[in-house]
Amino acid sequence: MTASLDADLRERAARLTVAFDGSAWVLGRPDLGVFVAVPEPGAVFVTTLQETGSADEATARASEAAGEPVDGGDFIDGLTAAGLLDPAAAPDDTVAPAGRRVKWIEGISPRAAARLFGRSGWSFYTVALLFALAVLVTRPDLRPSWQDAWFLPSPGLSVFGWLVLGIAFGALHEAWHWLAGRAIGVPATFRVSYRGMYIVYETDLTQIVAVPRDRRHGVYLAGMAVETVVVAAALGLRMLVPPGALDDLLAAVVLFRIVAIVWQWAALPLRSDSYALLANALRCHNLYRVTWLTVKNRIFRLTGPETAELAGAGARDRAMARWFALLYVAGIAVMAWVFLTVMLPLMVSLAQWGVTQFAEGQVGSAGFWEALVVTAYVGLRLGLPPLLALRERRLRRAGALL
C-alpha cells in the first residue's frame, strides 16, 4: 500500500517544474498555468518527491536544507490546495480555449526569433530610439499633436482609421512579445480573440516564471521596442515625404504610437509592460497586490484577511511597496496629462463635429449617417467595458454562492 502511495505521489510530483529565479524557487504546473514561489527547502522537497516518491525522504531532506524540522504533510496539503499536486487538477482538453490560435507565427523557430533579440537586435532598437528622440528634439514641426489624429477627410472616417491602426499595431506589439518569449525558449501561444465588440490579441507567456529573471527583461520590453521602431520609421519618412495624405497618415501613426509607449510606462497601476519589467527587475513576486495593500493600509484600514495577507507577503515585496507607491502616483499623473492633452481635445472636437452634422445635415444624408454610426461606435467603446466588467463581477459572485 505504501509503495502504491509513493508511486502516486511521485507521478503527481513529476508534473511540476522547479526553477530558481534569483530570489526564490518557483514550483509550477505549466499545463495549468499555476506557479508558486517557495524557499529552497520547498524545492528540495519537490525534487526529492520526483526522485523517490517518498514523503518521508522528502521531509528529511527538506528539514536538512532548512536547518530545522519541516512539516512534510502540511506542505503536501498546501501544494495540493494550490492545484500543484491535486490529481483532479488537469487541463480540460475537451474545451477549446477562447480565440483562434495563429499557427503560422508559432511555426517560427526559437533560433529564428532569437535573431531579433540578440545584441544586434537590441542595438537596432536603441538606435531607433535615439533617432526618434533626436528628430523630436530638433524638428518641432514633426512633434505629435492631438490634431494629427484627424488624418482622413472627415473626423468620422478618422475614427474608423484609428480602429484599423489600433488593430494592426496591437497585433504587432503582441507578436513581438511572443517572439521575444520564443527567443528564450518559453512555450507560448498567440491568439486572436475578442472582448465584446473589440478584436484583441493574446500572448500567453505564463511559463516565463520558470525562466531565470535576468532573461525575462527583453520579453517585457519587446512590445515597446517594436513600437519605437515604428515611430522612428514614421518620423524618418515624414522627413522625406512632402505634405499630403501619406504625411497625414504618418503623423497619426507617430501620435498614437508615442501615446502607446508613454501609456505603457505610466500605467503601472494597470499592470502594464513596464510594471512587469520593474517587478521582475526588483525581484518581486506580487508587487502589485502588496503595493495596493500598503497604500490602503496608510489611507484606510485593512480587513482582517487583508492584514494577514500583507503580513504573509514576501519581505522583498513589502520593502519595495513602500516606495513603489510613489511610482503609481506619478503614473496616474502622467495618464491624466495624456488624457487632458490628447484624449479630451479629441473627444471635444469629435463631439462638436457630430453636433454640427446632426444640426446641419439632412436626415438620411451621408453626413448624417456618418455621424450616427460614429456616435453609436463611440457609445459602445465607452459603455461596453463597464457593462462587461459588471457582468463578470456578477458571474464571479454567482460562482462564489454556488
Image (cartoon, grey):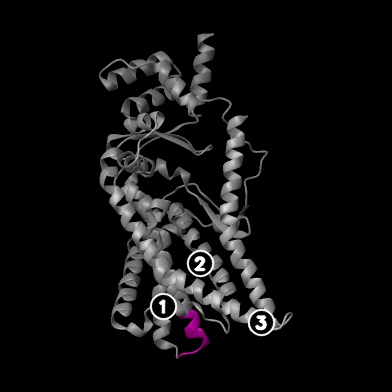
Secondary structure found at label 2: helix
Can you say whether 250 is above or below 205 in the image? Answer: below
Residue 225 visible? The answer is no
Can you say whether 87 is above or below 138 in the image? Answer: above
Splitting the image into 4 quarters, where does residue 220 fall? bottom left
Q: Work out how far the residue at label 2 is from the one at label 1, CA to CA, in angstroms.
A: 19 Å
Question: Could you tell me the amino acid type at mark 1?
Answer: Ser
Which quarter of the figure is the C terminus placed in? top right
Residue 232 visible? The answer is yes
Identity of the residue drawn at 58% across and 62% down: 381
Range of the magenta residues? 243-251
Secondary structure found at label 3: helix
Disc 2: which residue: 169
Apparent side of residue 318 relative to residue 394 in the rendered image (left or right) = left
> Mark 2 vs mark 1: which is more N-terminal?
1
Task: Name the mark on residue 367.
Answer: 3
Q: Which one is nearer the viewer's eye here, 137 or 19?
A: 137
Secondary structure found at label 1: loop
Task: Name the mark on residue 145.
Answer: 1
